Image (cartoon, rainbow, N blue to C red):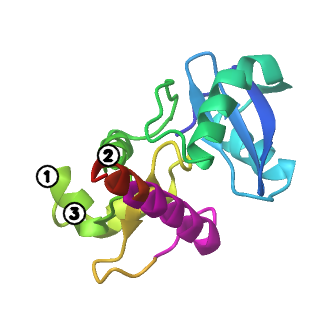
Amino acid sequence: MKTGTNEKIYWVRLIHADWNLYMAATQEGLCYIGSPDKPFEELTEWSALHYPGSELIQDEEKMKPYARELKEYLSGQRQDFTLPHDCKGTAFQQDVWKALCEIPYGHTMSYSDIANRINRPAAVRAVGTAIGANPVLISVPCHRVIGKNGSLTGYRGGLDMKMKLLQLESEQAVSERMLRNV
């Protein structure tokens, strides 16, 4: 959804372990997490489409809290994101993205589960389209949505990224269960 404002969008390139991606935020909150190893143009094209006329400003200081939370997550030290999002979308997309944030860490749901959760059981394809439009990979955990048969399905960041994130969460969840049983 286009806003038509001349908003400032602050960005940083996050390099952590074997992760290399761009992330951006407005004054309101995190608005973008890019695909791994993609060029800066992915961010510029996205911002031109969703925030036409906005100014992209590299600002490591402003982005530090967002980068810290993402690094903690990627290191297995964080399960939930606490900083605000500024995700522009339709009311339907917002409902889908909110439902994604309710999927517990280390768990998955199907597209039809999400459609049922938002009380639109016949809107499975539309749910898939809304998930594909999620601008904030990882933080709005669309990687936790899989096919009804348990298969990995499309992901803006690529199936390798999706598998890596699911594996990270699965390993952390198993480790935590083992620690609780000791």
Using the rendered view, name the quadrant where residue 125 is placed: bottom left
Q: Is residue 133 left or right of residue 69?
A: left
> Height in image: 161 above or below 45?
below
Residue under label 3: 113
Label at residue 14: none
Q: Give the vertical position of 180 relative to 28 (above or below).
A: below
Indicate yes or no whether the magenta region holds residue 160. yes
Which residue in the rendered view is the most extreme toward the front?
182
Q: Is residue 45 magenta?
A: no
Classify 23 as above or below 65: below
C-alpha span from label 1 to label 2 = 11 Å
Q: CA distance from mark 3 to mark 2?
A: 15 Å
Q: Which residue is mark 2?
A: 92
Location of residue 177 in the rendering, given as x and y in whole percent from the top left corner: 32, 55
Q: Amino acid at mark 1?
A: Asn
Which of the two labelled residues, at mark 3 and mark 1, occupies the earlier sequence position? 3
The answer to whether marks 3 and 1 mark residues whose Cβ atoms lie closer than 8 Å is no
* Secondary-structure class at tag 3: helix
Label 1, on which residue? 119
Q: What kind of secondary structure does the magenta stretch mostly adopt?
A: helix
The quarter holding residue 6 reads top right
27 shown above or below 169: above
User: Could you tell me if the residues under marks 1 and 2 are in contact, i.e. CB atoms within 8 Å?
Assistant: no
Name which residue lies at 52% across and 28% down: 86
The residue depicted at 50 percent of the width and 39 percent of the height is 78
Q: Which mark's residue is nearer the viewer, 3 or 2? A: 3
Q: Position of residue 12 (x, y in %)?
A: 80, 33
> Disc 2 residue type?
Phe
Classify mark 1: helix, strand or loop. Answer: loop
Report the residue at 45% width, 77% height from top.
152
Q: Which is more toward the observer, 27 or 19?
A: 19
Position of 66 with respect to 126 (left or right) is right
